[in-house]
Image (cartoon, grey):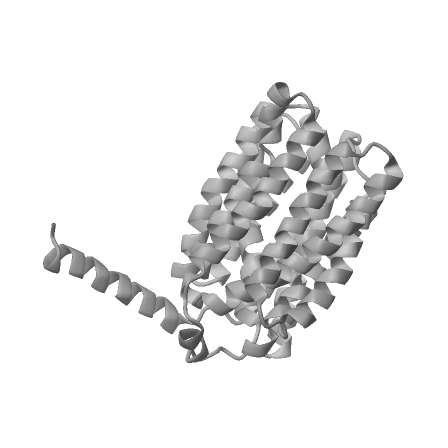
Amino acid sequence: MQFYLFSMLVSSVAAGYLSDRAPRKTILIWLSAIAASIVTLGCTFLGRTSEMILFSIILGIVSGVNLPLIGSFFSERTSPEDRGRIIGLPIGLSFLFSFSYYIGVPYIGDSGKAECILVSVLCLSSLATVIFRSSESAEKQANRKEARFKTRQIMYYSSIVFLLYWVMGILFSIFMPSILEHVSKTIFYLAWSVPFLLGAFVAGYMFDSMGRSFPAILGLTMTGASLALFGVYGLGSNWLYLILLSVGLSFSIIFSFLVWADLAPTHQRGLFYGCGVGLMCLAMLLGLVSTGTIFGSVSASYIKSYILYSAVALFLCIPLLIVAEDLLPKELIEKRKFQEYLEHARKKYINPG
């Protein structure tokens, strides 16, 4: 995991810089996605630790190339007031697919192969969803007036994303393995993936209809509250808290991918996404290192202290969101609502059938 994140950090920044100069971006997106899928499937045939490390580095490189390309394409072909709904679907489906190997293991018989196959399918299906739903023409996007954000605003949002993914590094290092020791894999899948998918749909709509700040604050509050409950009451009845954690993270993760599209100027979309993905990888890497363990279950007192620290870190993000300027201007929200009203009136009165 650490080799994967470090190689992804380096390649994403380099690919972000180069993607702004790529002439045929769609072809490169598909090639890098197919390469990531092939490398992931290749992991099913490996057994040695040295081989897994090598393939983790290669997978980190191709994944780091793929994400800035998709991000810059997504930024170019979508209007700001539609981005939440467009990106909500693939992110929600990604968690549904990537954790569904818990259900498929009894039938496939090998959890590693099941996971790799599903992740490979996920790479291509999520990619296709983003590309086919991102339909705004380049001419229309070029004529759109861009919001100008100061360096201070960029630092605010970067700090929020960094703290969020530092917490996620802790969650995936010690929290999730400890949870799996107390609940069945089926309950974990249903309490984690399904609420995340539903939360992603709702979050996408709210980000487009209410602006970025309020839904992001709501997501951070739900995530921080669920972690605080885990820290205070422990792992008893944890699947109830897990649902709240899943919904809160769906809001926060969608925000973390929206923010770079909103902040990036026209000619630096790839660079912003590359640096943004690199920042997320760095934060997760530091989260893994800060726990003092690579991956696995830990004692109740150990996990309680880290979960409470994580909850405090997330609540510290909320003042930054309140101070920072909202990434989606009010006039765009009002414009979208007016367009929906006109469309509803047209269907009702002009084409009632």
* Residue located 77% across and 31% down the image: 297
Quarter of the image for the N terminus: give it.
top right
Q: Nearer the viewer, residue 314 or 5?
A: 5
Percent of width and height locating residue 12: 71, 62
Percent of width and height locating residue 92: 51, 44
Q: Quadrant of residue 259?
A: bottom right
Q: Nearer the viewer, residue 347 or 15?
A: 15
* Residue located 45% across and 73% down the image: 138
Count of marks, rendered view: 0
**Could you tell whether 145 is left or right of 288 in the image?**
left
* Residue located 61% across and 61% down the image: 28
Percent of width and height locating residue 166: 72, 52
Q: Nearer the viewer, residue 42 or 195?
A: 42
Q: Residue furthest right?
A: 50
Q: Nearer the viewer, residue 40 or 293?
A: 40
**Could you tell whether 37 is left or right of 336 in the image?**
right
Percent of width and height locating residue 4: 77, 49
Q: Is residue 250 visible?
A: no
Up/down of 335 relative to 235, above or below = below
Q: Quadrant of residue 296?
A: top right
* Residue located 75% across and 40% down the image: 173
Q: Is residue 124 visible?
A: yes
